[in-house]
Structures are given as structure tokens and as C-alpha cells.
Image (cartoon, grey):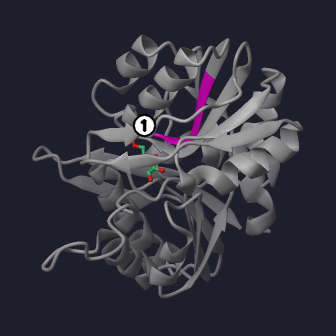
């Protein structure tokens, strides 16, 4: 087996290569003067099993994934496993209004063309896996995030909405603390409303868990509520840290004590490494 690292997921590919003792393929990637991408695999991979690791965010990494998949296919690899640490475009998973594209499905169908197996981490909704026309599996980052939050000695785990409730339950079980949740209503892509609710957080350290932090609106509203109710410290954690626009500023202004994300999207808050959680499913 060989591991092929895409530009977006170098750290995970490197960690995996070390953990499962499989070499990384040598590649040549460059841009033409008009910025189109050129991809070449430098090793001979005919008849080999190849695991490609590439997050589909931002858009340029999607094109790169398609070219890597094509290069591996054309080089006559035996089996192609595609690991998508963060499956971008997953949130549009249905036709909310007539005429809309279902981006989660569109991307899944294209990736399936050259993949024998797909693995992703905490997809926005589990049923997205059914959009792939090949075997597709997901891995949870929650246990690894929970281990990190345990080192912060949190007294409680909070889900910022019902969608994150199962993750909060799972994390609290690992840490051995209480959990609770808030009720969120999304107004639009940038704005959310959190229903006031009495939480038992006075003088407590609280860890919030969610799959994605995008604009930071959900987390900022949750932090505000927790601090208003007397929480001593608030740690916000997510699997996929998009941190769009002013997200970090918003979190800091709300009084966040620490921002934590995994490395499914590599950023300065990627304190939790996901490679280990991926190893079992790859084998
Ligand atoms: C929504 O269902 C997700 O789980 C996240 O809560 C959401 O994507 C976070 O978005 P934002 O950071 O923009 O509030």
C-alpha cells in the first residue's frame, strides 16, 4: 500500500504513513501560468493499493483530488481508497428549494467514479455516506476531542444544538462529566438564535462540542449564554475548523478561553490529531 497526500491534508497523510508504516508517494504538483493545476505521480504504482488523503475544502482542493484520483487510475493502481478528512459541500444535502443543486450528492458521485472505498470524518449528516456510489465509511473525532478536553478538567460538556447532542453525550461519557444542550434556530447562513435556558454551569469549566465552526456564530452565542450564567471557563471544540470571516474575533470577543479543532482542516487550532482514529478503518 502507498499513501498519496493531497495539499490540504499533508499532516494527516504524514501521521498515517508513520502510524501504519506505509510510504508516502512522491508527486509533482505545479501550476501553469494561468493557474491550472498539473499533477504527476512519480512512483510506479501499477497493481498497488493507494490511499489518497485530501480534504475537499476550499474549492481548489476538490480539483486537486479529482486530478490525483485520475492520475492514480491512469497509472493502473489496483485499489483506491479516498480519505476525505473534511468533506466540504456536505451541508447542502437536500433540495431545500426547487431548482437547487444537492452539492453533497454531486461531489460524492464524482469522487465515487475513481474510488473503491471512501472514508470521511464526522460528516455533517451520516446519511451523506449513501450518496457515494462505492463503499463509504465515517470515523468519529469525538473520542479524541474528548480526551483533549479531559486534560482541561472540564466539568460539563455542552452541545450548542440538538444536532450535536449525541457527540456531547459521547464526550461526557469519556470524560466522566455531565452534559447538556441548547436549542438553536438558524436564521440564515450567518445568524443563529439560541433559546435561553437555565444551565447548571456556575463556576464550572464547560467544553462545547460541535462538528463545524464556520462563522463562529453558533459558538459565540453559546459562550455568551454560558458566561452570562456564571461559567468559569469555556472551551470550544469542533472536528472541522473552517473559521470563516471574523469567526476567531467573534469567539474571542464572546470570552472564549480556548479554541480547539482537529487537523481535518489544517489551521493554528488543530490541536487534536485525527490520524490515529483513521488507522483501524484503513486496515
Ligand atoms: C450546524 O448544524 C453545524 O453543526 C454547526 O453548528 C454550524 O455549521 C456552525 O456554523 P457557524 O459557526 O457558522 O455558526
Residue 158 place in picture, x, y as percent:
65, 37
Disc 1 under 8 Å from ligand 1? The reply is yes
Give the residue drawn at x 69%, y 23%: 201
Q: Residue furthest bottom?
A: 133
Q: Is residue 106 visible?
A: yes
Q: Is residue 268 visible?
A: no
Question: What quarter of the picture does the C terminus occupy?
Answer: bottom right
In the drawing, does residue 263 fall left or right of residue 187?
right
> Taking 152 as reference, is 67 above or below it?
below
User: What residue is drawn where x is 28% and y is 74%?
Assistant: 102
User: In the rendered image of this protein, does residue 48 appear above or below residue 159?
Assistant: below
Q: Is residue 250 magenta?
A: no
Ligand 1 falls in which quarter?
Answer: top left
Mark 1 crowdedness (10 Å alpha carbons): few <14, some 14-19, many ≥20: many
Q: Nearer the viewer, residue 138 or 195?
A: 195
Q: Position of residue 218 (x, y in %)?
A: 42, 37
Residue at horizontal 81%, vertical 53%? 21
Q: Quadrant of the N terminus?
A: bottom right
In this orientation, which residue lies closer to the viewer: 176 or 79? 176
User: Taking 7 as reference, is 97 left or right?
Assistant: left
Q: Is residue 107 above or below residue 152?
A: below
Task: Name the magenta segment's main secondary structure.
Answer: strand
Q: Which residue is mark 1?
A: 218
State the image coordinates of residue 9 (x, y, percent, origin top left). Answer: 52, 46
Label 1's element?
helix
Q: Quadrant of residue 192?
A: top left
What residue span does the magenta drawing correspond to? 235-242
Q: How many numbered circles does the render carry?
A: 1
Q: Residue at x 28, y 39 (%)?
A: 191
Amino acid at each position: 500500500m502507498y499513501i498519496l497526500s493531497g495539499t490540504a491534508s499533508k499532516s494527516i497523510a504524514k501521521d498515517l504513513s508513520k502510524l501504519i508504516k506505509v510510504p508516502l508517494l512522491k508527486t509533482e504538483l505545479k501550476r501553469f501560468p494561468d493557474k491550472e493545476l498539473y499533477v504527476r505521480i512519480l512512483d510506479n504504482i501499477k497493481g498497488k493499493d493507494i490511499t489518497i488523503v485530501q480534504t475537499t475544502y476550499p474549492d481548489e482542493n476538490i480539483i486537486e483530488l479529482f486530478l490525483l484520483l485520475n492520475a492514480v487510475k491512469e497509472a493502473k493502481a489496483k485499489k483506491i481508497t479516498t480519505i476525505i478528512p473534511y468533506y466540504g459541500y456536505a451541508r447542502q444535502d437536500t433540495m431545500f428549494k426547487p431548482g437547487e443543486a444537492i452539492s453533497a450528492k454531486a461531489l460524492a458521485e464524482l469522487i465515487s467514479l475513481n474510488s473503491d472505498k471512501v472514508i470521511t470524518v464526522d460528516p455533517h449528516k451520516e446519511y451523506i455516506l449513501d450518496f457515494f456510489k462505492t463503499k463509504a465509511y465515517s470515523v468519529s473525532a469525538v473520542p479524541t476531542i474528548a480526551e483533549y478536553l479531559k486534560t482541561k478538567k472540564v466539568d460539563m460538556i455542552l452541545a450548542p444544538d440538538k444536532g450535536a447532542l449525541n457527540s456531547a453525550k459521547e464526550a461526557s461519557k469519556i470524560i466522566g462529566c455531565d452534559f447538556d444542550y441548547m436549542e438553536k434556530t438558524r436564521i440564515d447562513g450567518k445568524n443563529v438564535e439560541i433559546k435561553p435556558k437555565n444551565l447548571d454551569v456556575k463556576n464550572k469549566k464547560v467544553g462545547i462540542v460541535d462538528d463545524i465552526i464556520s462563522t463562529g456564530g453558533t459558538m459565540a452565542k453559546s459562550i455568551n449564554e454560558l458566561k452570562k450564567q456564571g461559567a468559569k471557563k469555556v472551551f470550544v471544540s469542533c472536528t472541522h475548523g473552517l473559521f470563516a470571516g471574523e469567526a476567531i474575533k467573534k469567539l474571542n470577543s464572546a470570552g472564549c478561553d480556548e479554541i480547539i479543532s482537529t487537523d481535518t482542516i489544517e489551521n493554528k487550532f488543530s490541536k487534536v490529531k485525527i490520524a490515529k482514529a483513521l488507522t483501524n478503518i484503513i486496515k
